[in-house]
Amino acid sequence: MDSKTEKKIKGKIGQVYTPESVAQFMLSRVIYYFKKINKDLKYVKVLEPCSGDGIFLKMLLQFGFSDITAFELDDTLSSKLLEKYPEVHFRFENVLGADLNDKFDLIIGNPPYLGQNYNADLFQDYCKRFKFCKKYFVGNMDLFYYFIHKAIEDLNPEGFLCFITTNYWITKSEKTGIKYLKPHILRECIIREYIDISKLQIFPDAPGQHNCIFILQKKNPKKKSSNKDQRINIIQVESKTSEFSSHQKFNYRVLQKIINNEPSPYYKRYQSALSNKDLQGNKSWNLLYPKWIKQLVEQIERYSIKEGKKQYLKDLFIIRNGLIFITDQIFVLEEGNQIKTEKENFFIKIKDKYVKLLDCEVERLKKLYKSSAITRYGFYKDDFEGYAIYFNKQKVLLDEPKDLAAYFSKCYPNLTKYLHQFTPKLKQKLKNAKENPYHIYFPRRGDRVKDSQLLVDLEPLYENARKIFFPYISNTNVFGYAESNYFATSDTYFLWPKNKSSYINYHFLIAYLNSNIVQFLFKAKNIKIKRSKTKLEHAIPIPNLKLFQSEDKKSIIKTISFLSSKMTEWNLDLNKTGANIISLNSLEEQINIIPFLEMKQLKSILNKKDQLAVQKKLNVLFYHLFEINPKIISSTIN
């Protein structure tokens, strides 16, 4: 019988039924692979682990499958299913807890999607009742992961698994819910086909329409041929166009064209540049990666080789979030609310009264920016959230004050009175986080970074160092730049150089990071910055400028650096950037040896401060530097 927890949320799982056109399509793709191994469908043992309203059963019988076992958790469907499909062997129980004596040649279906984060009680219940679920449980997983694990265990050697699921697990990497799933797949199976239908609206009433269909084949330990490396077949479906009145009509049309192998602008077939041996159990799988795109990526990456290895962002920089305070509502002071400014004086609100801050206290106030202020080559100077109270933890604790409260009351009396209004709340937050409850004056994170086991104080770097930063959530390459004060919240990532003695051409680098070349890499490598910088730091190659030895390549690099300096100057509204960038006149001789740059036109767009035109020139320079056809890059990005 079902547990109480299972009954309670039964309406949320297994109740989004698969459209007939999708079930028919999935069967047609599976049959294609059975034909390749000359398997008679009459002798194929089939398992449907979550039959729902029976649409897969209907299609299976129509295609000639006869040995079918079906599971369905919702026993209210039992009478209807038994009446409609008398030839199917039904079991009205949870397949995850079922003891199956048989193995199957085909397992097909649409397993339920349910995130563990918001349904912890169900997952705890499953782990208590089913050894299988306890074996594969990991935080942040989805319910359908269990169904993939179960299917792999229940397949015969050389049998096929075909599921439709959400697609986000494909691009998940280490420290997420795929801890056991991907290694299990790679250990036991070969991915034969991946069908990207994320642009289709398959389930009209279901939230989130990012679906995929995949076909796995279980390895045969007795046959080396079945275990050999295989390329992964890709079918990528485009989104609906205006010529179709409904999503359902478009879905039917495009899926039928694929079944019949008819040419169409609405989908494309290719082999992924990645084969099964390229996939790693703890990494993202960027399967939508045609060979010709891989060749372009390799063309860019060949210029990143240093000492025999490709250098990526992670090799030059430590990437860390901005500042995290105990609570922003207390530490980030809003103009006109907690703080007022009159001329150069600052007044802080203490018990409904504004008190003037001392000069030493004003020095502890930092304009704080969110990631929304970031723009390419700079940031919006006036778009700050407020003034953050920033006490330097490393410097204060170096003095070893015995009584922190007394120390701050003496040195910063008004800021201390302001903070002491909230002492119980601040201490409780630190206790809950298992941190020192007496450190109520300092940022919790982002004020220091560990470099080779040493703690580096970031305050002087936030204030005076050259720095590159980018938003915490982004689908494209937007990299900001600053040389003076720029303090930011935790929704901003900073690039802090690993080796302070190494020379970094910041103007070249910021232009490169904001170029179409890197935009192409974002698309090609499916880089999306969402709560994880991993893909970015491991996927963006950094050019080794010493590899560009010809005079024209050196001239291109100098010109890029010059134009980039102008972009940062305009974006930061500065008269000069502090960098020793040569003038346009002294650069003119070198620019003249670059045949595709016209000096007169370049001077015109610089005089107009036409940033869009300068960026176009920069993109052209990078195309020539990397010897890449710009039309290919542009068409790929589009």
Image (spheres, rainbow, N blue to C red):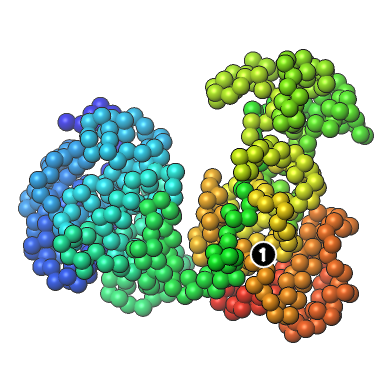
Q: Nearer the viewer, residue 23 or 289?
A: 289
Callout 1 crowding tier (Cα within 10 Å): few <14, some 14–19, many ≥20: many
Residue at the front extreme? 307
Relative vertical location of residue 625 with respect to residue 250 in this rendering, above or below: below
Q: Identify the residue at horizontal 22%, vertical 31% (top origin).
A: 129
Q: Nearer the viewer, residue 55 or 434?
A: 434
Describe residue 396's horizontal placement relative to residue 121 as left or right: right
- Name the amino acid, label 1: Tyr
Q: Identify the residue at horizontal 26%, vertical 29% (top origin).
A: 128
Describe residue 1's horizontal placement relative to residue 469 as left or right: left
- The image position of residue 337, as x and y in percent, is 77, 28
Residue 232 in view in this figure = yes
SS at badge 1: helix
- Residue ID for mark 1: 512
Residue 46 in view in this figure = no
Quadrant for the N terminus, please.
top left
- The image position of residue 299, as x and y in percent, is 55, 74
Describe residue 377's horizontal placement relative to residue 478 as left or right: right
Q: Nearer the viewer, residue 387 or 80?
A: 387
- The image position of residue 558, as x and y in percent, is 77, 71
Displayed quadrant of residue 625: bottom right
- The image position of residue 554, as x and y in percent, is 73, 75
Residue at the right extreme? 343
Count how many numbered circles sit on residues in the image: 1
Quadrant for the C terminus, please.
bottom right
Relative vertical location of residue 546 with respect to residue 486 in this rendering, above or below: below
Relative vertical location of residue 299 with respect to residue 483 in this rendering, above or below: below
Q: Identify the residue at horizontal 64%, vertical 72% (top origin).
A: 547
Displayed quadrant of residue 261: bottom left
Q: Identify the residue at horizontal 32%, vertical 38% (top origin).
A: 137
